[in-house]
Image (tube, coloured by chain):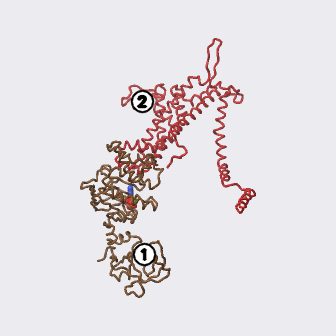
Chain colours: A brown, B red
């Protein structure tokens, strides 16, 4: 159990200001995901929490106690690195047991803990192998296993899936979700640049941009009421459509956001029709169709259609955005009232 | 039917066109690239070696290089029974001076390479840490290695001089010794002098090779150890050392090869001292000074054999991976 509080946290490398004052509370047992574009400071923030980097300014609290100057091993954390960080010359077993040997565990107890973790991750058959004899997915499981064995209060992941291929990524994502279910008491902090990972895993998501927090909330909060254009564009796939000019003026805002799944194709004689567009490209994903429509805006409008509706390129269609799902933003990119 | 005609077709094509397969072309190209090197190596390495081995089985002398007669193992070992019944053994293998040289060489190699390996690792660890001016220090530390041996041996010779050397002076002033020591001339300290100079000179080389090995180790492994709370000393012995071992082993091989044939440093620093005469030193004496050319050739041949055996044993025992197969 550990409740983590970040109070006005700053980090600079020399003159480079990377983390620019972050206030955040991560509740005990929560799965918190830091998401944001590459280079926004996610890893740096995670490393500040882990203690691998020194905090430049502000306070970091674990369960109400300031841990700014506590060394990593005394924070009760375990970390899974993007590059696995396995000891290349040790077997899987030794990799998992290496950090334990110091912690006054008996040999028998140590063995049990390693075997338990191995069973949990289905790597029991690999215990005698060296990391170089494993596939990427297996290596990442070993790295996760090594973290589980330590029975941490806080579990830190830094883009653990980004070196895996698409299929393995989904499988391992599931594994991590299961882990969160099995380890209810463990606080998990997970860094990713992939919003799908964030949406599927998180209890709450913290969207970072240039070293500051853009928005914190549950996945559905971020999806339904994004607090800025940045968040609106970052969360959701395919990306939200943004319309300006005369399209936005009609709704009394500077930028109008509408997700592809919230636009309906309606008949010619429907009185609710709003926009007319020509199909310029269609992507068939099997379950869904993505239509790219030229409606006279700066960029093509993307519409997501469930099912197998075939519409030929060049066809003219009439569109109606769902009124309940419009996102209006002002000039500052914040929600317009 | 159609199948067999197809086979006939390809066979036919092979026979008529005289072109080589891709594999053969590669082999041929490789041969032409290697040929100059092979010729060169034969001229400067294989031929002198074979000549030396040949001379060692003859009674050639420096004045009659082409008139030596084949004497089998006389230069290595032979015996004569006197009429009184006493047996006299002759040849290098019965020569106490030779065994003294072997002992000196092996002792020197073992001690110097051991010290250099330990110091080399330590220096490499320091150079691998991040600090201001690291690039400058890395370059500066190579200076002893860059100075020609003759120059550094002369320099140290003066510094160790018993009358006006700075080292005696300094030690006297701080009171560690109460009279001046003839470091290079005294039989007790000659070997120590040679070791000091060799360690001073070659540690940078060792450090640089170790540093290259250290830089191959991924940084995140250390971070994982840090998070796991593994003690730094344990990290060094259980993580760093095993991971630089391949680089260290190769560095040690180079140094052993070098140390076993040491000549120049000793020739300049402690000439004629029995305590430091090595195999190379006494075979040169016999070859060119004592006019026992064949005898010296036999010693050179033995030196070659000893180095070969040492290195083979080392590679075999340490399972050194010179081919780089073990790389991840
Ligand atoms: N050790 C460092 N020294 C200097 N700048 C750094 C260092 N580590 C990270 N940065 C900078 O901090 C910014 C954020 O990096 P990082 O946290 O790794 O981003 P992310 O993980 O979100 O992709 C980047 O612009 C990077 O260049
Ligand atoms: Mg990162």
Which residue matches tag 2? Answer: B168
| Left or right placement of residue A91 versus residue A54 in this view | right
Determine if residue B143 is in view. Answer: no
Q: SS at mark 1?
A: strand
| Number of on-image labels | 2
User: What is the chain identity of the residue bearing mark 2?
Assistant: B
Query: Is residue B206 depicted above or below B95 in this figure?
Result: below
Query: Is residue B225 depicted above or below A260 in this figure?
Result: above
Say the numbered circle drawn on residue B299: none
Say the numbered circle drawn on residue A306: 1
Determine if residue A262 is in view. Answer: yes
Q: SS at mark 2?
A: helix
| Left or right placement of residue B85 versus residue A65 in this view | right
Quick check: is the Cβ at mark 2 less than 8 Å away from ligand 1? no
| Residue in the image at 68% along x and 25% along y | B71
| Residue in the image at 64% along x and 35% along y | B49
Image coordinates of residue B274 in percent, x first then y, are 52, 25
Instruction: Give the foreground label among 2 and 1.
Output: 1
Q: Are marks 2 and 1 in contact (CB under 8 Å)?
A: no
Front residue of B5 and B49:
B5
Distance CA(mark 2)–CA(mark 1): 93 Å
Image coordinates of residue A314 in percent, x first then y, are 50, 82
Q: Label 2: how many residues lie within 10 Å, few (<14), some (14-19) or many (20+)? A: many
| Residue in the image at 48% along x and 50% along y | A133
Instruction: Give the farthest residue toward the top.
Output: B84
Q: Label 1: how many residues lie within 10 Å, few (<14), some (14-19) or many (20+)? A: few
Residue A196: quarter of image: bottom left
Image coordinates of residue B3 in percent, x first then y, are 70, 61
Query: Is residue B269 depicted above or below A218 in this figure?
Result: above
């Amino acid at each position: 159990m550990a409740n983590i509080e970040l109070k006005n946290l700053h980090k600079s490398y020399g003159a480079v200001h990377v983390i620019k004052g972050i206030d955040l509370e991560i509740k005990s047992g929560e799965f918190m995901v830091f998401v944001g574009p590459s280079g926004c400071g996610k890893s740096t923030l995670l490393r500040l929490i882990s203690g691998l980097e020194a905090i430049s300014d502000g306070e970091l609290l674990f369960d109400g106690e300031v841990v700014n100057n506590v060394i990593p091993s005394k924070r009760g954390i375990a970390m899974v690195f993007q590059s696995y960080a396995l000891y290349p010359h040790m077997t899987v077993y030794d990799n998992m047991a290496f950090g334990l040997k110091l912690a006054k565990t008996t040999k028998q107890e140590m063995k049990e803990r390693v075997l338990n973790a191995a069973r949990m991750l289905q790597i029991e058959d690999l215990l005698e192998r060296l990391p170089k004899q494993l596939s990427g997915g297996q290596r990442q499981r070993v790295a996760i296993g090594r973290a589980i064995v330590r029975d941490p209060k806080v579990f830190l992941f830094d883009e653990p899936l980004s070196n895996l291929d698409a299929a393995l990524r989904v499988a391992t994502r599931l594994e991590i979700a299961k882990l969160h279910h099995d380890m209810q008491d463990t606080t998990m902090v997970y860094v990713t640049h992939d919003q799908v990972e964030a949406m599927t895993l998180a209890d709450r998501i913290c969207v970072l941009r240039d070293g500051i927090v853009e928005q914190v909330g549950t996945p559905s909060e971020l999806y339904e009421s994004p607090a800025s254009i940045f968040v609106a564009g970052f969360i959701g796939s395919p990306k939200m459509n943004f319309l300006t000019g005369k399209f936005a003026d009609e709704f009394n805002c500077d930028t109008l956001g509408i997700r592809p799944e919230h636009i309906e194709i309606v008949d010619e004689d429907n009185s609710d029709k709003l926009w007319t567009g020509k199909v310029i490209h269609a992507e068939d994903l099997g379950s869904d169709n993505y239509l790219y429509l030229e409606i006279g805006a700066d960029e093509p409008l993307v519409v997501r259609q469930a099912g197998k509706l075939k519409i030929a390129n060049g066809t003219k269609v009439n569109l109606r955005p769902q009124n309940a799902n419009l996102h209006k933003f002002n000039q500052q990119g914040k929600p317009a009232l | 039917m159609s199948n067999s005609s197809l086979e006939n077709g390809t066979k036919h094509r092979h026979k008529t066109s005289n072109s080589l397969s891709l594999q053969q072309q590669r082999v041929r190209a490789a041969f032409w690239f290697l040929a100059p090197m092979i010729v060169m190596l034969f001229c400067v390495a294989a031929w002198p070696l074979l000549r030396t081995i040949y001379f060692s089985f003859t009674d050639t002398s420096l004045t009659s290089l082409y008139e030596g007669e084949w004497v089998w193992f006389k230069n290595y070992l032979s015996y004569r029974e006197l009429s009184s019944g006493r047996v006299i053994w002759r040849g290098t293998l019965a020569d106490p001076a030779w065994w003294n040289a072997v002992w000196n060489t092996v002792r020197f190699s073992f001690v110097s390479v051991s010290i250099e390996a330990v110091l080399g690792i330590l220096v490499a660890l320091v150079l691998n840490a991040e600090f201001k001016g690291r690039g400058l220090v890395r370059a500066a530390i190579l200076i002893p290695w860059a100075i020609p041996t003759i120059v550094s041996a002369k320099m140290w010779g003066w510094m160790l001089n018993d009358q006006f050397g700075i080292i005696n002076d300094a030690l006297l002033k701080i009171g560690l010794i109460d009279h001046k020591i003839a470091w290079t001339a005294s039989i007790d300290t000659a070997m120590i002098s040679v070791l000091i100079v060799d360690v001073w000179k070659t540690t940078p080389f060792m450090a640089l090779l170790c540093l290259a090995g250290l830089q191959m180790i991924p940084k995140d492994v250390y971070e994982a150890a840090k998070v796991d709370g593994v003690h730094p000393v344990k990290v060094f012995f259980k993580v760093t050392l095993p991971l630089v071992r391949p680089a260290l082993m190769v560095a040690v091989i180079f140094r052993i090869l070098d140390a076993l044939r040491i000549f120049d440093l000793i020739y300049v620093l402690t000439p004629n001292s029995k305590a430091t005469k090595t195999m190379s030193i006494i075979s040169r004496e016999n070859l060119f000074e004592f006019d026992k050319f064949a005898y010296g050739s036999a010693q050179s041949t033995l030196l070659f054999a000893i180095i070969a055996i040492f290195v083979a044993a080392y590679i075999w025992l340490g399972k050194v991976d010179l081919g780089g197969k073990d790389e991840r």
